[in-house]
Amino acid sequence: MGRRAGPPEGAWRGEAWWCRSAVDGRGAGAAMSERGAAGPGPAAIQVSRIMRPDDANVAGNVHGGTILKMIEEAGAIISTRHCNSQAGEPCVAALARVERTDFLSPVCIGEVANVSAEITYTSRHSVEVQVNVMSENILTGAKKVTNKATLWYVPLSLKNVNKVLEVPPIQYARKEQEDEGKKRYEEQKLDRLETKQRNGDVIFPVINPDRQTKEPHTVSYSQSSLIHLVGPSDCTLLGFVHGGVTMKLMDEVAGIVAARHCKTNIVTASVDAINFHEKIKKGSVITISGRMTFTSNKSMEIEVFVDADPFVDEPRERYRAVSAFFTYVSLSKEGKPLPVPQLLTETEDEKRRFEEGKGRYLQTKAKRQAQMQQAAQQ
């Protein structure tokens, strides 16, 4: 479902990218294969799975959360494998951050999603994983790139979940690769600190909302929450929630907000950086809350928080575990972009958040235009 600032140039360029099932969706299976590394670091991996009807919305487009979950699974496999590649204390790699991810093209029911992951940088206590997603129509053989993502993991000891272990270094083909990786590492550290400073914000739940009495296209009209009890199937070997599970739930809530606002078919356009501030333990009750913050002519930004209430073993006060911005676009039945109803702000806080969202949107738009100009000159 949704992501941050407007959709990538050309991603929704009038093509009818709604699609019907290429196969009937039965017999869905998963496979994982290894291939040689195309760059520095250990051999890359590929995780593949056919997309089933329960992976998609009513228009046949696979939910963004489903793809995000597959991306995180591939990243967790390769980073955990690398962190255990040398003799030492066994560990599991935990997701710390996902950089901005654009959804370049939809994946449809019956297509195969091929997710390839490769380690591109290691610091003393973290691993950077680059992931590409390619959809494949197994009837025609047609393939297309749908997503590119960057994820950061930290190795946590199996004996002491609060102990972060050292990461085995990788070998770089060129010194420039290491320098570029270090620059990305420092930038994401700074951004994480800035995000933590904003984490005092709260989305208050609407009790028994009567949407017939609320004005459409306001923040309160589309605001949504989901409550989930964390069970064993949601968790890693350490008993903490998989990052992919959390991202899928966040995408579901953001999609509900977008659908309530537009009342049309909506799809994920991009996800801003997702920061995992604290681990969520098995037995916790998590509240995933989403609200509309900004709309442009063709996209809408939704802010999503994940707050955790741990009840099992070690009761503590509710805390902010994850936060992110999602951007969605509205589509017609033919898959053509539709205008997005403008958000009506009512309070000073809503007006402030709208202006902040507008700033993020314009910044992303300017960055994309600069990248296009640079590519045209090459």
Image (cartoon, rainbow, N blue to C red):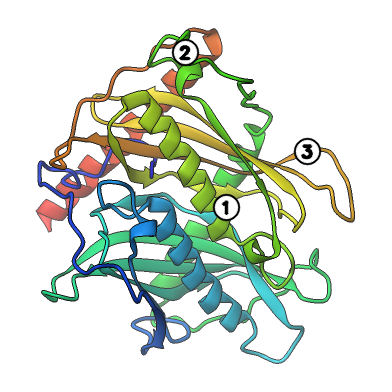
> Relative to the observer, which residue lies in front, 150 or 217?
217
Depth order, front residue of 188/172: 188
Vertical order, 357 against 146 (above or below):
above
Q: Earlier in the sequence, mark 3 or mark 1?
A: 1
Is residue 329 something that shows in the picture?
Answer: yes
Q: Label 2: which residue?
A: 351
Q: Marks 3/1: CA distance?
A: 17 Å
| Rendered location of residue 303, percent (x, y) | 50, 33
**Label 2 secondary element:** helix
Q: In the image, residue 360 lies at what x, y percent?
A: 39, 32
Q: Are marks 3 and 1 in contact (CB under 8 Å)?
A: no
Q: Quadrant of residue 345?
A: top left
Residue 241: percent from left, percent from top: 66, 59
Q: Nearer the viewer, mark 1 or mark 2?
A: 1
Q: Which residue is mark 1?
A: 246
For mark 1, does the 10 Å Cα neighbourhood hold few (<14), some (14 to 19), or many (20 or more) residues? many
